[in-house]
Image: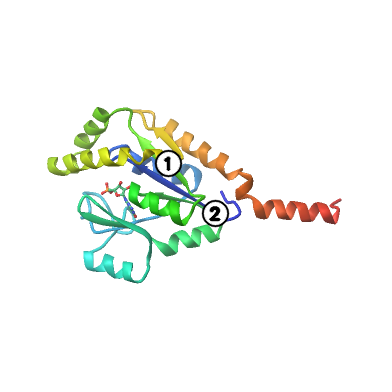
Amino acid sequence: MTNDRGTLVVISGFSGAGKGTVSRKLVEEYGYSLSISATTRKPREGEQDGVDYFFKTEHEFLSLVDYNGYIEYAQYVGNYYGTPRKFVEDCLKEGRVVILEIEVQGAMNIRQQYPDAILLFITAPSASVLKNRLVGRGTEEPAVIAKRMCRAVEEAESISVYDYIVNNEEGRIEECVEQIHSIIESESCRVSRRAEFIAELKAGLAEGAD
Ligand code: 5GP
């Protein structure tokens, strides 16, 4: 899937909304590129360096900040998270759709730098479903779950800045994935994103194509 300049798709959502699974499915099913973030958070069981995240010490992370190595970075519940610059810029040059799964501060930062990025917010149907998912996945201590729920209250204040809100209902993840794919497809048909194509078309017409 390509267009003139490439498309940045930001996927945010409350912890436990299922955005990680949704993003992976978008890559598997539709061939989008997924940016792998760097973080100072410790790996969870089963997470692999270079696959789920680039796991870094605080010193390593901040050294790359000094070299302008991230297009954005933020702190979330006591850890740093950042989007490595090179991968994203390469994808955009190739005209690809690249997904960033990042929290709201990062999303606001991306909006400033890339005004035509598509900002999507994924949510569960209710606060209680969210909490049950976070408790159910069993990867976080109760104190961390409480902090993530508090963070969700703050994040909810930023939803209005996003372009789309998509519900990830229990057992209906495919619908959520398809819905996001349709949004990306529709956005790729925007005249403002197809300037080069339109210019070529006009040039061909002016030359009097057979
Ligand atoms: P988790 O610890 O659950 O993997 O991620 C915590 C939060 O950090 C999630 O909301 C996730 O989307 C966000 N996040 C992951 N990578 C990045 C990044 O590169 N930049 C920003 N700003 N947030 C990120």
Name the spot of residue 54 as percent of width and height, x first: 30, 60
Image quadrant assignment for residue 12: top left
Q: Residue at x 75, y 51 (%)?
A: 201
**Which residue carries the number 1 mark?**
162
Q: Against 22, is 169 above or below?
A: above
Mark 1 surroundings within 10 Å by alpha-carbon count, few (fewer than 14), some (14 through 19), many (20 or more): some
**Viewer-closest of 113 and 18:** 113
Q: Residue at x 72, y 54 (%)?
A: 199
Q: Against 17, is 32 above or below?
A: below
Mark 2 surroundings within 10 Å by alpha-carbon count, few (fewer than 14), some (14 through 19), many (20 or more): many
Count of numbered circles on the image: 2
Q: Which tag, 2 or 1, sits closer to the chain's start?
A: 2
Q: Residue at x 55, y 59 (%)?
A: 94
**Which residue carries the number 2 mark?**
6
Image quadrant assignment for residue 25: top left
Name the spot of residue 99 as percent of width and height, x first: 44, 49
Q: Dot 1: what SS?
A: loop
Q: Dot 2: what SS?
A: loop
Q: Answer left or right for 7 relative to 193.
A: left
Q: Answer left or right for 148 relative to 93.
A: left
Name the spot of residue 135 as percent of width and height, x first: 19, 35
Residue type for callout 1: Tyr
Name the spot of residue 89 as percent of width and height, x first: 48, 61
Residue type for callout 2: Gly
Q: Residue at x 24, y 42 (%)?
A: 151
